[in-house]
Amino acid sequence: MRAPAPGGPAHRALLRHLRPQRGRMAAGVAVGLAGGVLGLAQPLAARRMVDDLGRGHAAIGPVLLLSLLVVAGAVLAGLGYYVLQCSAEAVVRAARGRLAHRLPRLRVPVVDTTEPGDLIARLTSDTTLLRQAAPLAVSAAVNGTLMTVATVVMMGVLDPVLLCATLGVVAFVGVLVALVAPAIGRATRDTQEAVGRLGASLERALGAFRTVKASGAERRETEALERAAEEARRTGVRAAAWESVSATATAVVLQICFLVVLGVGGARVASGAIGVSTLVAFLLYLFALAPRVGQVVEGVGQFQVASAAALRIADAERLEVERVEGAGEPGPPVAVAFREVSFAYGARPVHRAVSFAVPARGLTAFVGPSGAGKTTLLSLIERFYEPGSGCVLLDGEDVRHWPLARLRARIGYVEQDAPVLAGTLRDNLTLGTAGCPDADIARVLRLTRLDEVVARLPRGLDTAVGHRGSRLSGGERQRVAIARALLRRPGLLLLDEATSQLDAANEAALRATIAAAARDTTVLVVAHRLSTVTSADRIVVMEAGRVRAVGSHGELLARDGLYASLARTQLLTS
């Protein structure tokens, strides 16, 4: 991996983050610079104090002046730092705001091929690096450079000979920074990517926490986390090594510079070329020069760190998103039709010229062997994916022409694993329908038999359900997902094996609820249970990505061998 080049994509990405705060950053730099200027005057005040003491005069005035310069310089430096920190927080807030606005809108295929843990790292740790490095790096580079130049000028005014000895050392430090900075940037980005992989490994383990425990796979997942942590440590040590080389070499060179100036200056004092007060002032400037040069070195290193973080954030901001604009409203039942739809996940074909039509209202069931493409049908209707060819029609209009907000407002969708989000039960039920009347919530609770569950909970609807609904049973999570879909009053209800985790009594109740909904709604259900299928108005049999047959339960038993086989086995008929 190449290091970020000056003016390259990484630096341009960082400057894009800093540009909106350039006014506040300039103010912080200016205030800090004013404090630095007062610091430049301190050696001159010290020189005057030494001269007065050497002549036997009272040095009260120079001492008071020096004290005033020290205090005022410190106050201005602290104020400048505070202003820069405020601008840093604003930079981070803006970056997190853009990612927070973008990540939930990513297209489903993008999320399918991206590690969630890495996306989390970009929103958290990478943006944190912007706060730690970006504005302060600019301040260090600008103030450090200007104050270094000003210090060198003042040293030249005091004694050009000693200045020449100093400049040779400063030039060496500049060459050192130019050589080391790219390596720091490269190592830093490697570290950030390793941290992203560590987050992805942890998210993978926590996402299937109970499965990991039930499988006795804690050791394997622990080893995977430890390998990721070791990789992050190794890359972090590499970055620290380059930073250490830079800091150590700079410190050694400056110490050598001090010894050279002390030797040459002592000789010049002995020869009468300069006075002791001049040498004292020059040494004070030299002491001030050392942190200034270190500030420049640190600023360049921090700029590399921030640039690497900004480039990773920019990569996330370039991920393809959906355009979800405006708001949708529930509507009447819709007719659904597939016309010669073909679709593939990458190189793996799923659908081959699928065609069928479903009228508005009624219950349509999709059955077929695993991998036949049943669930993907629902994903295409929701526009989680786009067909490779052909079209999906709602009320005769291609779904690609529907605004996404309007499309999804008409649809209630219950996924196969019926996910529940961390938060309260009320939060989960009203997801996407904030401000829903309590009467509507009570209605769907009765329909899905969740009213009995709510009555048992310590805080009713305001009870926390745990991470991914861990405090609810599988059947309860499934009923929550169905209730959430019904609360939307959809014109089209998509159910993907929505009763697979329910007991017989709750399944029968929900089957009646679905049948009642089908009188006023178009219901499409992917089913494996015969009890769900037999009452359907029509059944679509899928095999190997094609529609094999369409008909009622009795018709298909009589004329389709695959359906009859499924009815005897997967559909659990006697």
Image (tube, rainbow, N blue to C red):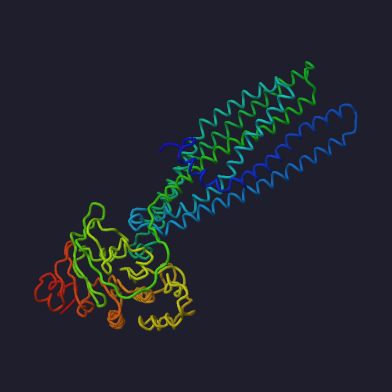
Give whichever of 149, 133 is nearer the camera: 149
Residue 186 shown left or right of residue 172 in the figure: left
- Tell me, yes or no, if residue 103 can be seen here: yes
On screen, residue 133 above or below 286: below
- Tell me, yes or no, if residue 504 can be seen here: no
Residue 393 shown left or right of residue 191 in the figure: left
Image quadrant holding the C terminus, namely bottom left
Could you tell me residue 99's position as x and y percent? 46, 54
Residue furthest to the top: 271
Instruction: Give the quadrant of residue 301.
Output: top right
Image quadrant holding the N terminus, namely top left
Could you tell me residue 174's position as x and y percent? 57, 29
Could you tell me residue 280's position as x and y percent? 76, 28
Residue 30 shown left or right of residue 205 in the figure: right
Residue 563 shown left or right of residue 218 in the figure: left
Q: How many marks?
A: 0
Could you tell me residue 365's position as x and y percent? 22, 73
Give whichever of 209, 488 is nearer the camera: 488
Instruction: Give the quadrant of residue 441.
Output: bottom left
Give whichever of 227, 75 is nearer the camera: 75
On screen, residue 446 above or below 184: below
Q: Residue at x 40, y 54 (%)?
A: 200
